[in-house]
Amino acid sequence: MKYNTNDLSQILDVTTNTIRRFEEKGFLNPERNEQNGYRAFDGGDLEKAIYVGRYRKIGFDHGDIANLFQENLGMGLRRFQVRMRELDEKISDLMATRHMLSDDIILMERGIANKGEIFEKTCRSFYYILYHQNGQINTHGRNGEAYRKFKEECPEIKYIYIFDKENVENENLVYSEGIASNEIFTGLYGVGIEPPIKHYEKRPSLMRFARLPIDMENEKQISRNALKKLIYGDFLEYVRQNSLRITGDMIGIKVGFSSEEDREWQYVLLSLPVEKK
């Protein structure tokens, strides 16, 4: 049986240009009518066109397909196995991205609903590494290597602030910045945990969502004292009123960017570990 270009395009549900491209790549070899230029494809062309369509959907490029048409089934199987591993890696990356996106959505929804109110909750356990520490960039040497390796090995990370316990207690606006990942994920992805990577312990904590200037270090519109109160004030008042003791550094998880009141902000989930005196 003979088929024309339109027949193949309808059977495969592709454009006639796609059929012509298959022909240009050498996958199809139709008979040509020298008088009118029409092409007549046979059953072999149809079957090969079907395989080209399938292989393209799997993700093989035209070079791969040309090789597949020159190889036996065993060699083709090995190409398929390699492609399967590539797809598994992509699916794993997409699942990690989706989980991170889902977590961000939950934090953003809670940030909108919370309106800055303090609540008590057990903080998650994190591993983290700093890229900015007490006014100094910290991405060189051993720390820089560990930082880049941490990002490479763990696709599910959060950007964070760390406020040392002493600075919180004394209301010193000094902080460090870094990246962190839930201990569950560092285990899941086999992240190597060793210094300078640090552990943030799971502990009972006071939490609140704070709207902070996007660049606290160079903030001009809000005074330094007002900024300290914005970050520490409610926490310290709550600690005093409820006879609590601060037990460790405060962590701030960066939730999302926001443009409000003609300026730039970011919402941060602040978590201060405490215990009863």
Image: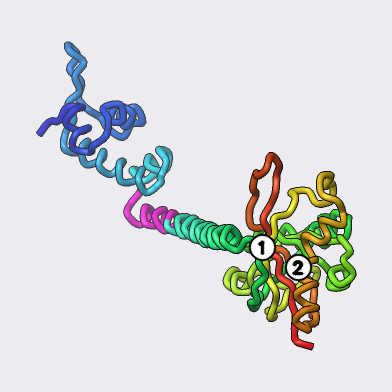
State whether residue 146 is above or below residue 22: below
Give me the residue at 56% from left, 61% from top. Answer: 113
Circle 2 crowding by C-alpha within 10 Å: few under 14, some 14–19, many from 20:
some
**Looking at the picture, how far across and down is residue 176, in whole percent?**
82, 61
| Tag 1 and tag 2, C-beta contact below 8 Å | yes
Q: What residue type is labelled 2?
A: Asp
Residue of label 1: 116
Q: Residue 128 carries which label?
A: none
- Quadrant the N terminus occupies: top left
- Magenta segment includes 75: yes
Residue 106 lies in what quarter of the image? bottom right
Identify which amino acid the numbered label 1 is placed on: Gly
Q: Which residue is drawn at 20% across and 20% down?
A: 32
Q: Which residue lies furthest to the front in this view?
A: 241
Q: Note whether residue 144 is visible.
A: yes
The residue that appears at 76% across and 61% down in the rendered structure is 161
For image coordinates 67% across by 70% down, the residue present is 118
Horizontal placement of 69 versus 111: left or right?
Answer: left
Q: What element carries label 1?
A: loop
Above or below residue 268? Residue 24 is: above
Q: What residue is pinned by disc 2?
A: 234
Nearer the observer, 172 or 117:
117
Mark 1 Cα shell of 10 Å, populated few (<14), some (14-19), many (≥20): some
Task: Residue 165: give x, y in percent of width and height.
Answer: 84, 73
The span picked out in magenta is 70-83
The overriding secondary structure of the stretch rendered in magenta is: helix
| Quarter of the image where the C terminus is located | bottom right
